[in-house]
Amino acid sequence: MQKKYILITLFSLFIFFTQGCSHTPTLGEDMIEQGDSTKSLGKKWNHGEALVKKGHKSIEQGEAMIKKGEKLIDKGHDKIKNGRKLIKKGNKLMQKSETSYHHVITSENNNEDIQD
């Protein structure tokens, strides 16, 4: 009979220590283990904890997206600045070409008038 109690005690201690080594129970898990009256509170607490973790992850992702977006905005401003420089340079080339063209045409017309 004593052997039976010793085996039960050893088995209980084994279960107790192996459960204790796996992880520290959360407050929600403790609430669930207290009984039916606190079981629903424990489940709600666990659900709340999961939401908090999810919220932190969402915040981290959002901050990363903002950082990436700010870099894209900076790149966009650089592209716009470069585009404006190209337009200015292109307009100057077009204006010079047009002015030169008018001089060439005027010179040719003047030469034709002189030869006639």
Image (cartoon, rainbow, N blue to C red):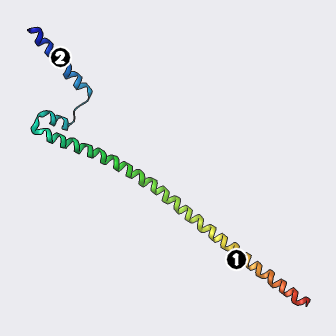
- Give how far across and how far down residue 35 sits, in percent: 11, 34
Left-right relation of 21 to 103: left
In the picture, measured across the screen, residue 66 lies left or right of residue 74, that is left
State the residue in front, 69 or 39: 39
The structure residue drawn at horizontal position 52% and vertical position 61%, both measured from the top left corner, is: 76
Name which residue lies at 14% across and 41% down: 40
Dot 2: few (<14), some (14–19), or many (≥20) neighbours within 10 Å? few
Q: Which residue is mark 1?
A: 95
Of residues 98 and 44, the one drawn nearer to the viewer in this rendering: 44
Q: Secondary structure at mark 1?
A: helix
Instruction: Name the quadrant containing residue 100.
Output: bottom right
Disc ID at residue 20: none
Does 82 sit left or right of 7 as displayed?
right
- Which element is circle 2 on? helix
Please report whichever mark, 2 or 1, sits nearer to the chain's N-terminal start: 2
Label 2: which residue?
11
- Farthest residue, direction right: 115
| In this view, 22 is above or below 83 | above
| Image location of residue 73, percent across then percent down | 48, 60
Task: Determine which quarter of the picture holds residue 38.
Answer: top left
Tell me the amino acid under the disc marked 1. Answer: Gln
- Is 89 on the left-hand or right-hand side of 60? right
Nearest-to-viewer mark from 2 and 1: 2
Residue at the left extreme of this rendering? 1
Give the percent coordinates (x, y) of residue 4: 11, 11
Tell me what residue is drawn at x 89 percent, y 89 percent: 114
Q: CA distance from mark 2 to mark 1?
A: 96 Å
